Image (cartoon, helix red, strand yellow):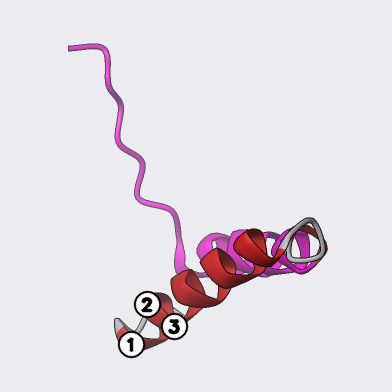
């Protein structure tokens, strides 16, 4: 119903993830809460084989 799913290639996912990680490093400086949230999310990604 108006939603399109895309399955990106492994290479495209890696490029996106690298760009996101770089942006997150900047956002970590915004507040202690932002830094904590990013670290929690990165730990989740590592634990689930996403990163």
Q: Which residue is mark 1?
A: 47
Q: Position of residue 32 (x, y in %)?
A: 69, 66
Is residue 17 in the magenta section?
A: yes
Query: Mark 3 near mark 2, Cβ–Cβ under 8 Å?
Result: yes
42 sits to left or right of 31: left
Give the magenta range: 1-25
Marks 1,3: beta carbons within 8 A: yes
Q: Is residue 18 above or below residue 43?
A: above
Most common SS among magenta residues: helix
How far apart in space, not on screen, are marks 1 and 3 (Cα)? 6 Å
The answer to whether residue 2 is left or right of residue 43 is left
Q: What is the CA distance from the residue labelled 3 to the residue labelled 2?
A: 4 Å
Q: Residues within 10 Å of mark 1 (few under 14, many from 20)?
A: few
For the residues labelled 1 and 2, say whether their Cβ atoms are less than 8 Å apart.
yes
Q: Secondary structure at mark 3?
A: helix
For disc 2, the neighbor class at 10 Å (few under 14, some 14 to 19, many from 20) is few
| Label 2: element kind | helix
Q: Secondary structure at mark 1?
A: helix
Q: How many marks?
A: 3
Kindly identify which numbered label has been placed on residue 44.
2
Displayed quadrant of residue 27: bottom right
Front-most of 32 and 8? Answer: 32
Q: Residue at x 35, y 50 (%)?
A: 7
Q: Which quadrant would residue 48 be assigned to in this image?
A: bottom left
């Amino acid at each position: 119903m108006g939603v399109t799913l895309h399955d990106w290639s492994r290479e495209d996912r890696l490029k996106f993830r690298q760009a996101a990680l770089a942006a997150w490093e900047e956002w970590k400086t915004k507040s202690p809460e932002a830094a904590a949230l990013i670290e929690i999310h990165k730990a989740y990604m590592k634990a689930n084989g996403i990163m």
